[in-house]
Every structure is written in structure tokens, then in C-alpha cells.
Amino acid sequence: MGSATSELPSSRTPLRDTAENGLKIVVVGGFGVGKTTLVRSVSEIRPLNTEEVMTQAGAGVDKMPESSGKNTTTVAFDFGRISLNDRLVLYLFGAPGQKRFWFLWDRLFAGTLGAVVLVDTRRMDESWYAIDRLEHHGTPFVVAVNRFDDAARHSLEDIRTALALPDHVPLIDCDARVRSSGKDVLITLVDHLHHLARERELTA
């Protein structure tokens, strides 16, 4: 992933009068995987974020690839909003990725209907905790591979195997900087939630 920056809304988009359903969605993943970028790129309002400049004191704790160029970090959560259609609104919460903030995740999952696990193939082991916690809470999720330019191009099949993902969990590529790509991830999640809901109705 090169030097391109994420897209930001030029102005605040009011919530539509026709909006009937609001879903809480959490974006989780390892440190520096692109969660803030994803929320920022898809949000139709200026996203709330709690980024702080990384200091030398945290250099040995928050480890990033040297090529990342990342100099800020989320210390609480990011928040954004996107309307997928006239009736359906998603409220997005980006969780902090550093291990010392993982204790916040369980609280953030409260009331969450679904989640996006964002993956960096250079550090796939940092995705396991997110997947484990979501499975523990019984929260449906999709996995999106944020393709960085300097990362090896592993196939989705290889990534599924490495993460031990069941076949029913959607796995897709994305570019967190691009609004249309991020929106495709969220649509995939909503379709997954609808599919699970239909399955529950058929077995009820």
C-alpha cells in the first residue's frame, strides 16, 4: 500500500428521514492494520477518532513494519457512520489494535451485530486474538485482507488456511483507503448477517 491517503467526506451528510434500522459494527484487527483508515474512508460524517502521536516511549511496545510510515495510534476507538441504503445505517466502531488496549474490546462488542476483522498479511498472527474473541462472543464476522504494496501476495485460500477460518466465514480483499472497497466489505458483512438470519428462521 503506497502513499495514497484515505478519502474523507467533504461535508457532513445528514441522517436520512427514511432510516429505520441502525446496526452497530465493530472493526477489529492488529496494530496498524488500517482500521482507522477504513472507518475514515467509508464514513459519511467526519469520523470521530482518538489518535495520538506515537512517542519514543512506546517504540518497544507498539511495533510496526519499518516501511509503514505510521506515526499515530488509536487510544480508545474510532467512530463513523454510513448509510447503505435509504433504510439501513451502519454505526462503525474501530477498536484500538495495540495489545495493551485489547481489554477494551469485550466492552466494545456489547450490542454489536457483526464485525470486520482487518488483516495485514505481514502480521497475520495478530489477527488470531480478534477472531478468537468474536467466536467467544458468538459475534458474526467477515475477514478483509488489507493489501499493502510491500506485502507478499498470498492467495485468499492460503490466508483462510493460515487463519483456520471455517468455510462459512466470508474472506475478501480490500483497500482500506478506498471508499468503494471499504463499502464492499460492509455490504459483504450485511449480506452475511442476512444469510445467518435466514438460516435461523429455517431451523426455528
Image (cartoon, rainbow, N blue to C red):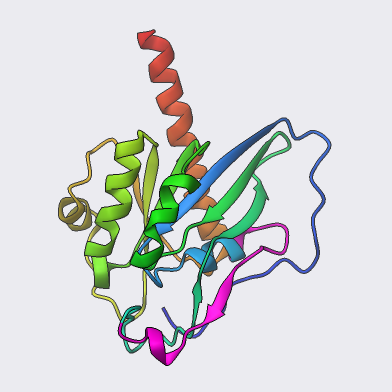
- Residue ID at (48%, 63%): 35
Magenta range = 41-60
- Residue ID at (67%, 63%): 47
Work out whether 164 lies above or below 77: above
153 lies left or right of 138: left
Q: Residue furthest bottom?
A: 56
Q: Residue furthest top?
A: 204
Work out whether 29 lies above or below 85: below
- Residue ID at (40%, 88%): 57
Q: Could you tell me residue 100's position as x and y percent?
A: 36, 66
In the image, residue 50 lies in the stretch drawn in magenta: yes
Location of residue 33 by image quarter:
bottom left
Look at the image and tell me whether residue 55 can be seen: yes
Q: Could you tell me residue 10's position as x and y percent?
A: 77, 69
Q: Could you tell me residue 139's position as x and y percent?
A: 39, 36
**Quadrant in which the C terminus is drawn:** top left
In the image, residue 13 lies in the stretch drawn in magenta: no
Magenta residues, dominant SS class: loop
**Quadrant in which the N terminus is drawn:** bottom left
Q: Nearer the viewer, residue 33 or 170?
A: 33
Location of residue 13 by image quarter:
bottom right
137 lies left or right of 160: right
Q: How many marks?
A: 0
Q: Could you tell me residue 120's position as x and y percent?
A: 32, 67
Q: Nearer the viewer, residue 183 or 51?
A: 51
Location of residue 65 by image quarter:
bottom left
